[in-house]
Amino acid sequence: MRAPHRHALLFTAFAAALVLPQLAGAQEAAGALLEGAPRTTRADYPQIAGLSSRTLAWGLAQMHLFLAAFVLAVPLFALVTEFMGVVSGDGRYDNMSREFMKISMAAYSLTALAGGGLTLALFLFYPDLMGYLMKVFRGQTLIYAALFGLESITLYLYFYSWDALRYGNRKWIHMSIGLLLNTVGLTLMFVANAWATFMMSPAGVDASGAITGTVWEATRNPLWNPLNLHRFLANIAYGGAIVGGYAAYMFLAEKRAEVKAHYDWMGYTSNFIAIMGFLPLPFAGYWLMAEVYAYSQQMGITAMGGILAWLFIIQAVLIGTIVLAANYYLWSGLMRTDRGEQYTRYVKYIAVVIVGGFLVWVTPHSLILTPAELQQLGGPNHKVLGPLGIMPAKNTAVNLMLVFTFLSFQIFYRSSRVPTVSWAPAGNMVIVALYVVGCLNIIAAGLYGYFTPTVYKVGASVPQVVSTLTIILGSLIIDFFMLRGAKAEKIHWGRMSERSQYALFVLPVAFTWLMGLMGYIRSSLRTHWHVYTIMKDNSPEAYIPTIGQAGNTITVITLIFMGVMVFVFWLSRLGTTKQAAPESGG
Amino acid sequence: MARNKWLVFILALVGWAAVFYLLDRYLMESQGLPVGANLMPL
Amino acid sequence: MTFLRVMVFSVLVLLVYTGFANILPQVQSDPPAEEAVDTGAMDMAGLIAYGEDLFSGKGTCTLCHNDLGRAPDLLNLDLAEEFELRISDPKYSGAARGMEGPEAVEAYLRESLVEPSAYVVAGFGKKGTNDTVSPMPAADAPPIEMNEVQLDALIAFLMDRAGLEPTVPLPSAAEAPVEEEPAGADDGGEPPAATGAEAIEKYSCSACHDLEGSGADLGPPLDGIARRMSRGEIMQAILEPNAEIAEGYEPDLMPGDFAEQMQASELLLIVDYLANLPD
């Protein structure tokens, strides 16, 4: 079936799945307004063919999220790259932008497919929960269905009109379509986020679950905006990482020098996008956790101090590898310019901070010990390393790692530009001073946390993040003025080691697994509730699985996703492959 | 020229220190955490 | 060839993460178990022990009340001194104000459990509220959902740790707590009936039996039933109506799901009520 028809069919099926229960529920909605959330028993959860309903829903949800993150992110940086092409007049940006869209086209229908599958699984295995959520969100589900239609329309318009709307005023029309596409996509995510966060921090309902507020109130629950911001930023980082992986693969597989150069440039740009999206993420994550704590201290502590605490150590390992990989790629990039050589001496210092920060971050505070170990250690926490396990140390480590990652990026772009302004030496000193004071401030705020009650510890992390952002923004602004009219060094795109490309593979793999892990944490925060404190989860699988089980599940889903992405990329290559016509007279 | 550079550095250090101090004060106080008060040992 | 190398590399990276997740301490968290604790025969020592169990179990108190500074470290503080200080704090204007002795402590503890923001110990309030709002959830509301007996047990436990003789009442048989609400109870959050007459009305008994002057005769008359049946038999007749049909009456008329619908306390109230019906 041709793509447009397939989409239309999917959309209709999806809309029907959403609309029909609505119509059925509409009659009862009026009279049942004061009815609380359903109280389910084990028997209310259908068991079908011995399938694990939780694993199925989890797998489909995760696939949908991976794909959705990708297809939301790509149009975003495609639009930005397209805009850069208009502003700089460099046609390569436009080509790359179009290539971004091309490699992701196949992913859209797969996203909808996974979403449709998820919806079916949810309604099949958790009918009472879904019935309740439909009642709470009422008309919004129809809006969600309609948005899919709009997304399809704008997507096809944006992609297929590329050449027809290539130059001048028409280009601006094209970019407006792109903007509309991004807006619709973002709205879709915001709507879905409302349902996910309602399950964690319900609003617009009373203690028994009876609907007392409007749909907007249920949507605007305490965790909605923090999740919106976090997912928005994470999508960008994730999309950049996946495209970077694609570019790295093409770089390795290509033999022709100029094509290699193209993919090297694409890899660099994608890595840049991934880092830009990644740097503010800890701040968004912090806001999300802060809101969790504000909504329910219990929920917050379950996450960070209770049974889920170890997961954040795994998170530290994952983010540590991401930061290291991204940095390694940047350091390797110094070989692209002839001047780059003189900056390589800074690399070892940056590496020390990054690895050191990672080690601090990975250090746990409380260890689950056997009695013998307890005796040996002399207590539940290690005397020397224990203090490194609490928040002030971790925040300090993270912020320093981010600052120095940005520094890696800064020395790379500086290596290809020689400032020509007269005040350059002074300007450099201002930047150095900024780094020195900023880092000291981060460390000081961290130390402050050791001498103050918990509330101050948590509060002190805000100046730390703002310091990081100040260093980054300050450097960028000063550089903007200082590099005006700078002498551009030739960047030899394509002059990169093979090893460096593997760093670009680590990024999407680690990001994908990390997303799976964070999803597991987010769902587990609800413990044995479908809708926290309002609707209990009485299904047979209401327990929180062990990290090992979760890790295994996440790995399997990640492997499937990798297979899907290979398929998606292969399809885009297939689209440009032409079989040679057979010799005539055969 | 070289001396100039280091002078700028010192001045910048002082300048940035002031900026960060004010930023810290503002950020802590806007969270309702008066800095300097209530410093208790763990 | 490149493809294979890339795939193998990626799978290896994945295996590192998977391996890491598997070597860490594995903890499975189950939903709170449905335990029906027999408190009918409990003495004070038993109640205190039950309270201690709840403190680190269903109550999830140790999540915050530990040495990490989020909440007062109840297990390591000198509770006798602490309670004294708080009740006599000029800022304190709660239920225990003006009271003295163990009763004051009981009142203070009960208030702390169900109304944590009534008084917040200095330094532990929610950020920015100047110690007027507590981050602690009410212990009798979801997600903790302690019932009356469990609250009493917690109070007894803490009072005992403060070296005081607990002043909470011992639970009687009529208050046998069931951890989870009976499955299928669709009362939409309505509290259980408090008297026998209320329960009779709630379950519409007079629709079929001649009670409260209804004159209904779909089911047998129940006056003087205590002379014909023991309490146990009355209970069975309510929970399993089709087990024995009275002569001249039809089977399958009386609802057979009272076992799921009724709270244990309501059943006991109804049995009491019926047993006291005059001839």
Image (cartoon, coloured by chain):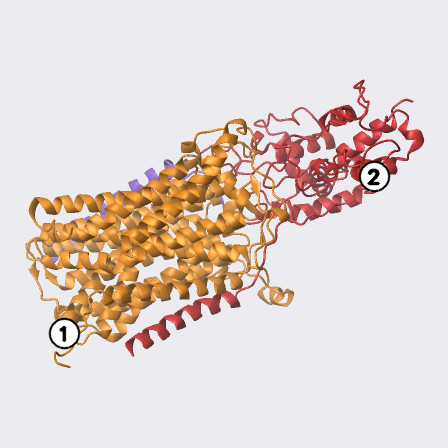
Chain colours: A orange, B purple, C red
> In the rendered structure, which amino acid carries the disc numbered 2?
Gln
Position of C12 with respect to C191 (left or right) is left
Q: Is A299 drawn above or below residue C246 in the view shown?
A: below
List the residue tagged with mark 2. Answer: C236
- Report the side of A30 relative to C178 (left or right): left
Question: CB atoms at circles 2 and 1 under 8 Å apart?
Answer: no
Label 1: how many Cα within 10 Å (few below 14, some 14–19, many 20+): few
Residue ranking furthest to the right: C227
Residue tagged by mark 1? A257
Towards the viewer: C193 or A143: A143
| Front in this rendered view, residue A262 or A326 | A262
Label 2 crowding class (10 Å Cα cut-off): few <14, some 14-19, many 20+? some
In the displayed structure, would residue C260 be above or below residue A303? Answer: above
Local SS, label 2 = helix
The image quadrant that residue C213 belongs to is top right
Residue A412 picture location, percent across and down: 19, 63
For the C terminus of chain C, which image quadrant? top right
Give the residue type at disc 1.
Answer: Ala
Q: CA distance from mark 2 to mark 1?
A: 88 Å
